[in-house]
Image: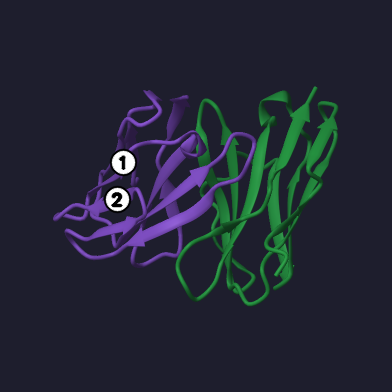
């Protein structure tokens, strides 16, 4: 099992540009979570899906953020337009029938 | 909303000393999980506690869940340099699948 796969690992973009982060969860896991980690705010839950359906997006900071899960093996988190304060490490995690989240390696986003 | 607080934020110890981090929730939890994140890495699941007063051990790590299921602790006996990292507790709710993470305790171990 390759684990949760995120891409890209690093992204540097200019303010105002669209950014798309990608995640492939572990096969068979029915929950998928998007977290953002910063020094100031720690690990923040942005949105999570159950069986590809968004369940709670109350953590999405603004309308500039959107997430989709078109099928069980793929999810995206999009920021449009990006701003410098969006700079953070974005983690995707999945969970199956047994407890414990498996996190991906994260995407380090820098908006200049 | 639900909040999970963790203390201390940072801890520096000499190798061989013990270390403890504490976690408190504003609400009763259905379970609590602990994760470790190495510098530059991602959180890795360590353990889940479900029962009131539960105690679990993993080698030098001891995890406790409070009687009221609102607090938890992680104790490391005789720290080693490999224990360096940030330890997060995360509280789970019985009616949702989501976890709320504490701010984490960053452990530094001096050899």
Q: How many marks?
A: 2
- Identify the residue shown where x is 60% and y is 45%: B42
Q: Secondary structure under badge 2?
A: strand
For image coordinates 60% across by 72% down, the residue present is A29
Q: Position of residue B31 (x, y in %)?
A: 32, 60
Residue positioned 28% across, 59% down in the render: B56
Which residue position holds label 2?
B62
Residue B77: mark: 1
Question: Residue pushed farthest left?
Answer: B67
Pointer 2 local density, CA inside 10 Å: few below 14, some 14–19, many at least 20: some
Q: Quadrant of residue A65?
A: top right
Q: Front-most of B47 and B12?
A: B12
Position of A79 with respect to A51 (left or right) is right
Name the secondary structure under disc 1: loop
- Closer to the observer: label 1 or label 2? 1
Graded by Cα atoms within 10 Å as few (under 14), some (14 to 19) or many (20 or more), the crowding at tag 1 reads some
Left or right of A98? Residue B3 is: left
Chain containing mark 2: B
Q: Is residue B25 above or below residue B81?
A: below
Q: Position of residue A102 (x, y in %)?
A: 58, 59
Residue A9 position by quadrant: top right
Q: Residue at x 25, y 44 (%)?
A: B26
C-alpha span from label 1 to label 2: 8 Å
Nearer to the camera, A42 or B75: B75
Frontmost residue, B38 versus A17: B38
Which chain contains the residue that carries disc 1?
Answer: B
Q: Nearer the viewer, residue A25 or B10?
A: B10
The answer to whether the residues at label 1 and label 2 have Cβ atoms under 8 Å apart is yes
Give the side of residue B92 with respect to residue A79, left or right: left
Give the quarter of the image for residue A23.
bottom right
What tint does the image give chain A? green
């Amino acid at each position: 099992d390759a684990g949760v796969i995120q891409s890209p690992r690093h992204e540097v973009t200019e303010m105002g540009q669209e950014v798309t982060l990608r995640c492939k969860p572990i096969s068979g896991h029915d929950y998928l979570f998007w977290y953002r980690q910063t020094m100031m705010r720690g690990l923040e839950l942005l949105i999570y899906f159950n069986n590809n359906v968004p369940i709670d997006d109350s953590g999405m900071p603004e309308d500039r953020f959107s997430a989709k899960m078109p099928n069980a093996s793929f999810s995206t988190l999009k920021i449009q337009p990006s701003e410098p304060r969006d700079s953070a490490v974005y983690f995707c995690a999945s969970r199956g029938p047994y407890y414990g989240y498996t996190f991906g390696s994260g995407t380090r986003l820098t908006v200049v | 909303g639900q909040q999970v607080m963790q203390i201390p934020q940072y801890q520096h110890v000499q190798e061989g000393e013990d270390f403890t981090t504490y976690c408190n929730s504003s609400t009763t939890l259905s379970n609590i999980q602990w994760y470790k994140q190495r510098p530059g890495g991602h959180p890795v699941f360590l353990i889940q506690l479900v029962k009131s007063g539960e105690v679990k051990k993993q080698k030098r790590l001891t995890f406790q869940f409070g009687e009221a299921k609102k607090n938890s602790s992680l104790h490391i006996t005789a720290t080693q340099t490999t224990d360096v990292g940030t330890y997060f507790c995360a509280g789970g709710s019985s009616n949702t699948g989501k976890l709320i993470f504490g701010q984490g305790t960053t452990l530094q171990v001096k050899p």
